[in-house]
Structures are given as C-alpha cells and as structure tokens.
Image (cartoon, rainbow, N blue to C red):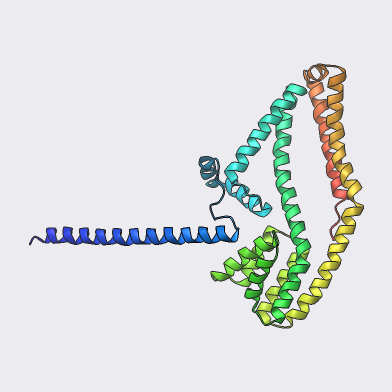
C-alpha cells in the first residue's frame, strides 16, 4: 500500500482518538462543574459564575499600556471589584458629567477646571480606598497574630496556620491571607508571599508581623511567645490609633470644609447676581483671580491635612 495512504489513515485515526479523548474530558468537566454547582446550591453558597465584566474591549487594550498596568495595580490594593477598563470608563463618564454641570451652573470656564479636579478626585478616591482597606487590615492584625500563635502552639506548621487564619478571618485579612496560602501552595517562599502583602498594604504593624514570621521561619525560635507579645503590642497600638483619630476628627472635617466653602461662595455669588461668573471669567484678570483663589483653597486643604497627619 502507498506510504502516503498509510500516513493519512494513521493521522485520521489519531485525530479521531484525540477527538474522543477531548469529548470525554469535556463531558467529565461539565459533570464535575454541575456537581459542584449542585453542592454549593445545597449548602446555600452562590455558584462560581462570577460577575459579568463590562467594556471588555477597552479593558483588553488598556491592560497592554503602562497606564493600564498602573491602574490595575492601584485597583488591586483597594479591593474594588473593578477592571481597569471599567474604572476608566466610569471616571471619564463622571468627569464629563462634572464638566457639563459646572459649565451649566457656574460658567464655561469652570468646565475644564472641574474636569481636572474630577481626575484628581478619582486618584484621591483610590488612595482613600487603599488607606481605608489598610486601616481595616491593621485592626485585624491582633486577631491574626492570636490565631497564628494558637495554631503554632497546637503544633501546626506556619503554612497551615496561615491557611487556617485565611478561613477564619473576614476581608480584607482573609482575602490577603488566601493569596498568601495560594502562593505558598505553588512553591513560593514565606518571605515572598508575605512581602507582597506588605507592599500592597504598607503599615508599620504589618511590617513587624511579617518580619517576625519570616525570621521565625528562617531561624526558628520561640514564635509562640513572639506572636503573643506582638498581639498585646498591636492591641495597644490599635487603641492609640483610635484615640488619635477621634481627637483629630474636628481637624479633618475642617480640612474638607475649606474647599466646600469656596464652592458654596461661587454658587452664592452666581445666585445673587446671575451671570456674574460669566462676566468675571470672561476677562483674563478674572480667570487669573479664580485660579489663584482655587490654588489657595487647595493649599489650605493640603496644609491642614498635613498638620493633622500623625504617624503612630
């Protein structure tokens, strides 16, 4: 028989065999997924379907740029369930809305100014969300140290103790420790896995905890006693931070009232004398005066925030 015919028949049989194996694997995967969904539905937990992502084309193109990667890293530290494409579209839509509203209610000159302030506000929102998540994580550190100490005293390995803490603690500590447990499961070292948490949620308390765990994993030692002493220290620092935040609450409100007073004064002037802002911003000297006044309001806000910021 012709060798070419034999080769064709062999390739056809091999392709048919691969198709059979592929169909079998697909059917087995479908059956496993159906069983998993049925088991989760019986236990009352939501099935792993996930949220439908919007603006996929924008997200795909944005992730290929340096700006998109920066936004992705920024969103990862905030814990927001948003993709870079969704965040960009929402920010641009909000900036356009603020631009149009400012131009309609104040004057056309305030449209671009409001747009720039909107872009700054988007970045400030991410920073605030990150600081808020970091603060929540710091408040969970005493409980985390206590769980690790109890698990280590019971004879469990540090990797097992971290997985146990990830299951018992709520977000954000539970989510971050789940990432650490996943990385440890695929072969990452404890220093690398815990170091990523310190980079995403920077704080002195977390750095001390990570250093204690890394040193104990490297050189051994009385990790239980160290974690129990660290638990007491973290509790004391937690109370100190709460007292300082309470005492500085009035100063914080004052910092936000400064720009609010400036915006309210503009609205008041435009309400008392309709068209005054149009006439004022129609000349170069009026535009300069508005920009200088906005700069002073922003400087007052920054200075008050700096003066009221106390690192513990």
Instruction: Determine whether 199 is above or below 163 in the image.
Output: above
Q: Residue 208, how many percent across, how many down?
A: 76, 69
Judging depth in this view, the residue of 58 and 152 nearest the camera is 152
Q: Is residue 10 visible?
A: yes
Instruction: Determine whether 263 is above or below 164 in the image.
Output: above
> Which of the image's four quarters has the C terminus?
bottom right
Please tell me which residue is depicted at 67% across the width and 34% down the height of the picture: 94
Q: Residue 146, how many percent across, how many down?
A: 76, 73
Left or right: where does residue 35 sit relative to residue 298?
left
Instruction: Determine whether 107 is above or below 88 in the image.
Output: above
Judging depth in this view, the residue of 288 and 156 nearest the camera is 156
Please tell me which residue is depicted at 70% across the width and 77% down the height of the picture: 151
Q: Residue 225, how many percent across, how many down?
A: 78, 80
Q: Is residue 203 visible?
A: no
> Which of the image's four quarters has the N terminus?
bottom left
Judging depth in this view, the residue of 42 and 212 nearest the camera is 42
Left or right: where does residue 104 sit relative to residue 273?
left
Q: Splitting the image into 4 quarters, where does residue 31 fall?
A: bottom left
Total label count? Answer: 0
Q: Residue 248, how many percent across, how many down?
A: 90, 51
Please tell me which residue is depicted at 64% across the width and 79% down the height of the picture: 157
Please tell me which residue is depicted at 72% across the width and 83% down the height of the picture: 221
Left or right: where does residue 143 sit relative to residue 157?
right
Q: Residue furthest left?
A: 1
């Amino acid at each position: 028989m012709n060798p070419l015919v034999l080769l064709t028949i062999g390739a056809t049989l091999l392709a048919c065999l691969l198709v059979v194996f592929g169909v079998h694997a697909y059917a087995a995967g479908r059956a496993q997924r159906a069983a998993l969904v049925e088991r989760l539905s019986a236990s009352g937990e939501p099935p792993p379907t996930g949220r439908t992502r919007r603006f996929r084309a924008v997200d795909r193109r944005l992730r290929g740029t340096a700006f998109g990667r920066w936004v992705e890293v920024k969103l990862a530290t905030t814990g927001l369930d948003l993709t870079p494409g969704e965040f960009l579209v929402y920010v641009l839509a909000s900036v356009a809305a603020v631009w149009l509203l400012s131009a309609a209610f104040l004057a056309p000159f305030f449209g671009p100014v409001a747009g720039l302030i909107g872009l700054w506000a988007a970045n400030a929102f991410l920073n605030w969300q990150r600081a808020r998540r970091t603060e929540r994580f710091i408040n969970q550190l005493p409980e985390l140290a206590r769980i690790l100490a109890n698990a280590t005293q019971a004879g469990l390995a540090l990797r097992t103790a971290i997985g146990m803490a990830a299951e018992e603690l709520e977000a954000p500590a539970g989510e971050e420790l789940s990432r650490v447990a996943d990385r440890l499961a695929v072969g990452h070292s404890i220093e690398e896995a815990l170091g990523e948490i310190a980079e995403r949620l920077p704080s002195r308390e977390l750095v001390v905890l990570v250093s204690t765990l890394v040193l104990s994993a490297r050189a051994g030692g009385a990790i239980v006693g160290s974690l129990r002493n660290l638990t007491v220290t973290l509790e004391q620092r937690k109370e100190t931070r709460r007292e300082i935040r309470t005492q500085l609450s009035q100063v914080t409100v004052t910092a936000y009232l400064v720009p609010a007073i400036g915006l309210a004064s503009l609205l008041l002037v435009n309400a008392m004398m309709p068209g005054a802002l149009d006439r004022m911003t129609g000349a170069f000297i009026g535009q300069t005066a508005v920009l200088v006044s906005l700069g002073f309001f922003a400087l007052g806000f920054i200075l008050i925030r700096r003066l009221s910021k106390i690192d513990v």
